[in-house]
Image (cartoon, rainbow, N blue to C red):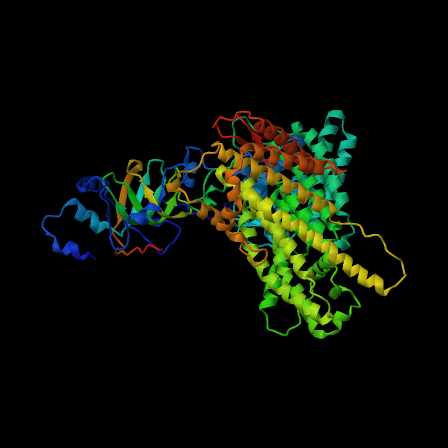
Amino acid sequence: MGDNDDYYDGDGTMESLATSPEVTYNWVDITSDFFKHIQDLQLGELLHDGHLFGLFEAMSAIEMMDPKMDAGMLCNRGNPKPLNFQQAVAAGKLKIDDLDPSELIGIIDATKACIVSWLEGHSLAQTVFTNLYLHQPHNITNKTLKAYCIAIYKLLDCIRDCINKAQVFEEEDFQPMGYGYRLGSNPQTGNTYDANLEVTEQKCIAMLREQEEELNKKARSGEDEANILWSALAARIRFTRMFYQALLLITKRDSQSGVDCVALLNGCTEMMKVIIKTAGKGTQPVENSDSPNPMGFEPMINQRLLPPTFPRYTRIKPRAEALQYFDELVTRLRHAWKITSCTNFHTALDFFMEFSRQRACILSRSALQLLYLSPSPATTASMAQSAMNGPVGQPRPQHAFVEILRESVKSFVNPPALTAKSPVLSTPQAREFVENFLARCVRPFAVLLQVCGHNRARQRDKLALLLDEFAALQEEAESVDAVLSGAAGTGPRACFGTWILYHVLRVMIAYLLSGLELELYSVHEYHYIFWYLYEFLYGWLVSALGRAETLAGEGAKCRDAKRAGAKKQKKRTRPYAREGLMCQVMQNMCGGYYKALVAFKLQGKIRQPQSEFDNEAVRYKHRFAPLSVLTPPQVHYHEFCEMTQPLQYENPVILYLGGCKHFQQARSLLETITTPDQEVSDLLKVAKTNFVVLKLLAGGHKRDSTTPPEFDFSAHRHFPIIKLV
Amino acid sequence: MESPEDLTKDVEVEDGKTKLRKWLNMNFRIEMTDGRVLIGVFLCTDRDANVILGACSEYLKGSEGEAEEPRVLGLVMVPGRHIVSIQIDDTTPPQKYYYDE
């Protein structure tokens, strides 16, 4: 766009403005009249066409010459107009041949910094496409740079494809707009399309490979100093190729190519070591300059492509940080790859949640989505939705995710209805019920995975919405259970219901906890948040897990009984032992906080809002509103008041001791875990510290102080360390 | 083109306000202190010459008088202190600018 050379050379008068030839103007100067006439207006009086335009409309105008609103202002800071590719080449400011290896390294590393800035949510036009070489990659004579630039086009396209497929980004995460740069198969800009310039994936990879060999040859033939430069350059080209290939594999899930994604990513890590070590070998950005490299980058080149209200000027990430980011990105992708060996939905969901906790970048979050479900959970969810809306009686498209869910139910509660030769399934009606139910589960569960991919702040609202869908599933699960129990002639066994309940509880807990992580609650609200978690949610989760174990055991027993004698009593391991234990830990932690908070309140240590400005019942209702699903029933404010009433007359010392006991209990439970991970050791630290603090408080320490205690979330995102100041 | 309340006024004593009112909904070309030129429909002003233009386009004027593709800005407010000159287009009949909700 920017380098179309059909600029109209005006003859100095505005009548001949080239943009819309049919419009001609006849400008008459009214400057002095205008400034004279406005004297007749009163201070603050607006002169406008009252019917069509008022103050309200006036408020939405962009203020010119305000650096925050006026993106065009920056183009005009007295800087000369930025040169485009051809102009820069003609002016001798852009070398397209005979580049030194250090110049090439500089350009490549600066481009990486631009890509990182793009991945952090800036626009493509203000980041990667400030690189002039990318405007006309086919006109570059230097073969290495040409191959690199073409590969960058392909890489950008692949990244965008990956992120678009996963659909886990919001405007603050990623800008998918291309601003007229034709990404993908035909690296060029503007409206002209030249099929000769088409570059396929294979060709792109081959070009990079060729350059790699070429550069390695040079590295072997030169002297020591030159050696290092050439091999540093070779490492960069090799990284680009392997990174591109790995991303292609992740995005396209093309398993035929015979290349191993893990090997590629390992190679990328190796190359990143060399790249970071040799970062100083390339040309470095001029100090105090906005350009990421002395040659090849024009930060302002695309400023005129931006929409009117486009904010800010984008600062490109510093090079050292950008290389670090790439290194970590490769590590994150390698970690995400591990999802491919999670066969069980249960472990996969845990993996998704754990991955999200590390606040991974948008590309690795998207990659994880694609690696687990092809094409992606987002697509699976929307396909399931359209299948549901389709005509009744039409056979449902069999989806791999249905099988994953079926396995999940089977391993969780082992319902007789999912056992292969079950007599229950002999009735077609029962079979239909089960299949319908599983098909209906696809969307909510796929959305659950998708939600885990979103950034932490966005997850909360999405979890609340998801609870509505789960509520509908609960109803369905109950009727399926009823039908199946009837068909089997057994007592009521809530297999499917338990499975759904377990997930509903997990979503509820995640929803409440996210409010702590996002610092949405005031300290004076903490007590009922922790109360709800302690008194109900974790307790229910423990019993749901217990029920699942019993049901699964019964299912196994039924089968064993039939195969009497054969392979007697394979000792069932308790698959959810650790999870159940962690639930108890959390429940105790919450109990500890709850009791401590009530005691603080009784001792006047917590600032309460003035009653005329606050209504606890309204706050409570608002905080727990999304939890109003079918089962478990929501605990209402009046119930909360009734249940916590006795505590109002309790001696604070007793409460502190009670809290102490909870933290002590949490601690000893945590210490039984033989293979503690980071989460466990963080929790252990919090539990130990809070135990000591509450012990001191029970002993009368700072009894008369009304200074509010501090809640320090630095050790754990949900469970704070209580600090007395 | 005049609104009803204008008609009731005495046409003889044309004060500044009436003159300004006649220019409403006509094309303005405003040059700003940084050299940029804005062309848009005159919608509103006040005593400090803050001008609101609708459907506004921004032109960069190069030193050789070379004109460039405009950038569409939409509704803008130009602070009076940044206005260098104002020109009005007397070819086109004033068109109503409808604000899109």
Query: Against B18, is A224 above or below?
Result: above
Q: Residue at x 49, y 35 (%)?
A: A601
Q: Position of residue A519 (x, y in %)?
A: 52, 39
Q: Position of residue A446 (x, y in %)?
A: 63, 56
Q: Residue at x 72, y 46 (%)?
A: A337
**Is residue A160 something one can see in this rendering?**
no
Query: Against A362, is A544 above or below?
Result: below
For this view, does B36 lie left or right of residue A589? left
**Is residue A497 something one can see in this rendering?**
yes
The mark total stands at 0
Residue A515 picture quarter: top right
Q: Position of residue A239 (x, y in %)?
A: 71, 39
For this view, does A58 lie left or right of residue A603? left
Query: Against A139, is A566 above or below?
Result: below
Q: Residue at x 87, y 64 (%)?
A: A563
Q: Position of residue A604 (x, y in %)?
A: 47, 32
Of residues A77 and A198, which is closer to you in this image?
Answer: A77
